[in-house]
Structures are given as C-alpha cells and as structure tokens.
Amino acid sequence: MIPQLQQKLVLCNLDTAVRKNKGDLLACDRWAIRLFEKMGGQLAFISGKPVHEILHQFRGSMPAQSVIACNGAVIYDGAQGEEVKSACVHEQEARVAIQDILLRFPSVGIEIVARGGGLFVVRSNLHVHQNLRSCRARYQLKSLDEIPRGWLQVILRGSEEQIAQIQEHTRRKYYGARNCICPQDPNTCVILAQNARPERAFEELCMLKGVLPQNCILLTDDQRDLPLAEKAGQTICSFDAPAPVQQAAGKNTLSALYGGGVGEYLYGMVKGYPDK
C-alpha cells in the first residue's frame, strides 16, 4: 500500500475512456486500474449513463470503486453495489414537461430511471429499442401513473433532428424551476433535478472518500466537465481534446485517454513511488 495514493482521488470520465473502444476499457487500462487500487489508489468514474447501463458495459463488475452516474444524479458504490447518494427530479414538473413534449413530438421515446435501479419505458421507438437491446437492461412498460416514486432521470430518445427540435422547444417553455433539460448525445436529452450537478456530486464524493477537492485529478476530454476542472486540483486530457478542455489542462496532456491513456496515467502514479 502507498499512503500517498490514499490521499488522492482520480476521477475519470468513463464516456471519454471508452468512446473509441466499442464501449469497453482496454486491457491495459483494466490492468493498471487493478494495480492502482491494490496499491491504495482511489479511482472513480463519471458518466452520463445510468448505473444499469454501466454495469452491463462491464459485465456486472464495476472496475472502479465509485461512479458518479446519470449526469450527477447518482453516486454509486461499486464495492457495496448500492446508490449512496441520489438527487431525484421533481415529479410533478417532470410530468408537465413529458406531457407537453409528447403533444408536440408524439414519436419521441421516453424512459424513466428510478431509484434502486428500476428502468421503466413510457413510450418506445426505434432509438429506445436499440438502446435496450444493446445494454440488455431489465425494464418494465408502464404509464406515468404506474411508475413508483423516486425518479432519477427522464431520458428522451429520438432522431438527431427531433432531439434538436425538442431542445429548442423546451428552451421556450417553463415547466418549473426544480428540474432542467440537458443534452446528452445527438439522439438523447434528459430531464434532471436542478441539484443533480456533476460538480455537486463530485464534492459529495470527496467528502465520502475523505479527500480534499484540490487533491483530485480529473481525466477527461468532455467540455461538460469544465465545472469539475475548476474544482479539481489537476486536469488531464488527450492531445486532441476540445480547446477549452486543453486550456483547463494546460500542459497536462496524454497521447489519448481512449487509447490507453487512463492506464498510462495510473501506472505513472504508482511508479512515482518506486520505493514501495
């Protein structure tokens, strides 16, 4: 064990790390993660995906100790297999938004992720079907009134053009002040609680781990992580990351986080203490 490693936390954007690797970590990354954690290092992932998709991605075994999932709505303890923190949407405001969106875009797909890992499909379409098939998640078909309380995330899926139209439409509407509607990828946008912010979840995770934010290292190429970069002590990115991320990282760049850079950095941290 290396005591100095226990005083730090590495937070890695999972979606960055796997984006060119068919949704999985490279073998060299997995090896370095196991070594890093064995030597006392603390690693956490951050992802826009729900926990059930991440677990399927890694065949039911989480390679990191903790995960900030659902765009900051959930902190999941991989060792205990449970949510330790969650921020739920305001359901009445979410219902108003869903009903309005369905009136304007009746073909949009709608999934709801509930506390405890429940996944409910309110309206299916080709994009919902493809996602359910790829992640092989257990789900239930339910109406809004049948879904239990404790919604973590409402997921809207459609074509790239439709999701862009939904985002433009919702910018002009007021559904209340306690939720927000955020883009996730070209075919997806999500309804989240206003307090489901990755930077807030990051601060809570630091408290749970007993690590000061300035002792944290952020590995990311995602511009949405820039608020985290302001709080973390150091930011590392790939050489081809977007310019704002490279500016936040300064000279702290790797060959590619998605090409073995995660493992390279973690192994370098372990090698930094050659006497251990």
Image (cartoon, helix red, strand yellow):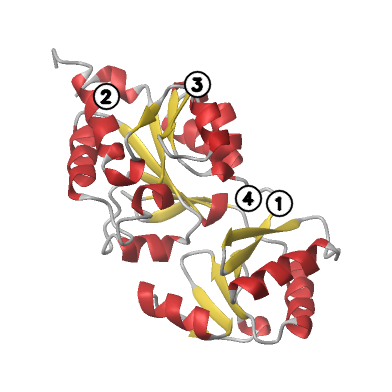
Callout 2–callout 4 Cβ contact below 8 Å: no
In this rendering, is residue 111 above or below 21? below
Alpha-carbon distance for marks 3 and 1? 25 Å
Of the two numbered discs 2 and 1 in the rendering, the one whose residue sits closer to the viewer:
2
Mark 4 lies on a secondary structure that is loop
Mark 1 lies on a secondary structure that is loop
Checking the image for residue 194, the label placed there is 1
In this rendering, is residue 276 above or below 223? above
Checking the image for residue 214, the label placed there is 3
Callout 1–callout 4 Cβ contact below 8 Å: yes
Q: Quadrant of the C terminus?
A: top left
Query: Sequence-wise, which precedes: disc 3 or disc 2?
Result: 3
For disc 4, the marked residue is 196
Mark 2 lies on a secondary structure that is helix
10 Å neighbourhood of mark 1: few (<14), some, or many (≥20)? Answer: some
Alpha-carbon distance for marks 3 and 2? 16 Å
The amino acid sitting under disc 4 is: Ala
The amino acid sitting under disc 3 is: Gln
Please report the residue visible at 42 percent of the width from the left and 52 percent of the height from the top: 15
Checking the image for residue 234, the label placed there is none
Please report the residue visible at 21 percent of the width from the left and 46 percent of the height from the top: 30
Mark 3 lies on a secondary structure that is helix
Of the two numbered discs 2 and 4 in the rendering, the one whose residue sits closer to the viewer:
2
Please report the residue visible at 19 percent of the width from the left and 21 percent of the height from the top: 271
Please report the residue visible at 22 percent of the width from the left and 21 percent of the height from the top: 2
Residue 151 visible within the image: no
Callout 3–callout 4 Cβ contact below 8 Å: no
Query: Sequence-wise, which precedes: disc 2 or disc 4?
Result: 4
The amino acid sitting under disc 1 is: Gln
Alpha-carbon distance for marks 3 and 4? 21 Å
Callout 3–callout 2 Cβ contact below 8 Å: no
